[in-house]
Amino acid sequence: MKIQLRLLRIFAFCIFVSSTIMLKAQTPDPTKMLSCGEINIGDKLYSASSFEGSDNYTLAISDLFYQLPAGTVTNFSFIEGQLLIKGNQGFLYGRLKLSKNGYGVNPVGSEWHMVLQLDATTHNTPNASLGQPKSVTDQWQYFQLNTTESKLYNKNRPTEPITFQNLATDFIVQVGKGANNQNANIFGASSNFDWLYASSGGSGKLAITANSICPELNASIAGTATTCPGESTTLSIGLEGKAPWEVIYKINSVTHTETVTSSPYTFKVTETGQYSLVSVLDDNGFYAKVSGSATVNNYTLPNVSTLPTTKTICSGTDATISISFSGTAPYSLTYNDGGSNKTFTSNSTTANLILPVGSYHFTAVGDDNCSKAIDYTVEVKKEDPLSIAINTPDAFCYNNGKVSLTLTGTGTANTANWSKIGGAGLLEVNGISATYTPAKEDEGKEITFNVEAANGCTPKATATKTVKIYNAVAGFTVSPEPVEGLYIPGIEYTFKANDQGQANYTWDFGNSNNSNEPVVTYTYSEKGEYNVVLDVKNEVCTATESMLIKVRSGNVLYIPNVFSPNASNPENQVVKVYGENILDKNFTFQIYNRWGSVVYRTNNLTEAQATGWKGSSKGEEQENNVFTYIVRGQFENGESFEKTGTITLAK
């Protein structure tokens, strides 16, 4: 592209001899021309040459050297030059040759260097005579000469620059298309100006031709794609210039670099987000103008409601599976029936799938955009006719808590109504099962349980079960009672179960001796501690009770309080004195009737312990009655004793 440069109207030159002007760091070196590969992205580079006229000059300055006749014009022409546009700044620079009317140290043919810094301005006044409609000039860039940062000097005398001042126009360079909206191949402009050098001054003209060096390349990416998650789509980047290209682009905020060999460049992507070009550099080192963006989105995957694991149907019918879809219609459901794959389709978000008896494995759900793998297995079963029985034992132990009532048989009951006949306990229903908590009054009684059940295929099925409630109590008593908590060796004790109506009794007297009677007599012959255990059992119950028997040692004295000459146990037919450590000395044992008459007396300890009173006095048997006894004596340790009590004679 060609651009147009103008230096308009009058501006002044001032020449400073005593100081050197320092250029900013970004100012190009007038002796080094740039290549297109050396400029930054977005920069524009043009060649600058002298205006093609009768004198082919770049600068025409009058009265530059006072030694020459007044009105002498000194001309400068480009040896080489460039115009660099960097956004809101431009630089016109290069090497010039003094081509006409030099003098002294500045002869014809001497080399001069020039750098003009250009700053952007908002000037926009079309020149109608040149065919410049505002629709064209609106697209141009305008730059003004920065007099502070611009200079011209003999390369051998850099400390004596010519500087520019007092510009009368608001722009010097316009960048854009030429007259009538056509690209200008050559454009020359001449401008008058005033200048000062030391105490001298004059005027001059500037004329420049500029031609584009770097081609204007374009690269673009565009488009919007929506894919299923995990799937790819193809994007395309249009490229201009020479292959290969270095393409730098961003996916969201992450930068990627690719070397591309052909245009358009197509590539597959799976990542969602925004795709945009950062830069494109062709093999000639030219940067392209990048534009556009592409967007990749994902569809929301379709879904299906959770399917039942089991569906039970009545004989002669099929199962109806209710399905809810999400996504974009139409929908599909893929499954295997054990022999082949099937596909169910629906245009509605809700649908019913009809299936006969069998096993079905569902593997995928799809909609108009995507498909998603699923894993459901549905068993469609035929319901057996409902036939029930109550599952509970015929007998139950009261102490075992609750009677569990469940249903067995064929088919599956959906409802159950429970009732009972008899029983004072609590019947509790839990869905199709129940429990019964027996009451104390239920012991030994029968309770009848009734249930009426149904399901979707069988309207009514009934069952009845009678259960007897049992109980077992293992408590027992021991007589006679212990003396001061202790039992006496040699005394016959009666062990009697409290509940004598059970099936089995097992006594353990703590010394390997046993009995299986509900009432048993037992005599301990040795001192010690014995754990007496009674186990009671019936048809369903078991109970255990234990008692610690302490058989004493030391000073012991015991007189039974009842006897009968007709007892089966000889020891219970007489009244004897039982004890240990008793002395014969001073021993007496007397028994009185209720009128105070002595019916038995002995001072012989051996007789009292071995023979005792058999219930007669002076050869006559006494009638049933209550008698009083007194026993006196001493123990071996010298302790005296006297004990009084009553004895009942029971024939």
Image (tube, helix red, strand yellow):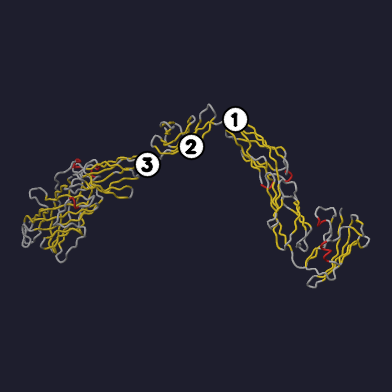
**Quick one: 207 or 280, which is closer to the camera?**
280
The answer for how far apart the CA atoms under marks 2 and 1 are is 26 Å
Q: Percent x, y for residue 456?
A: 58, 31
Q: Is residue 629 above or below residue 468?
A: below
**Quick one: 361 or 640, which is closer to the camera?**
640
Within-10-Å neighbours for mark 1: few <14, some 14–19, many 20+: some
Q: Quadrant of residue 521?
A: bottom right
Looking at the image, is mark 3 or mark 1 earlier in the sequence? 3
Q: Percent x, y for residue 437?
A: 68, 44
Residue of label 3: 229
Tag 3 secondary structure: loop
Q: Percent x, y for residue 66?
A: 8, 61
Q: Amino acid at mark 1?
A: Thr
Residue of label 1: 458
Taking 18 as reference, is 438 left or right?
A: right
- Quadrant the N terminus occupies: top left
Residue of label 2: 307
Q: Amino acid at mark 2?
A: Leu
Q: Percent x, y for residue 165?
A: 19, 58
Q: Amino acid at mark 3?
A: Pro
Tag 2 secondary structure: loop
| Camera-side mark, 3 or 1 | 1
Taking 95 as reference, is 255 left or right?
A: right
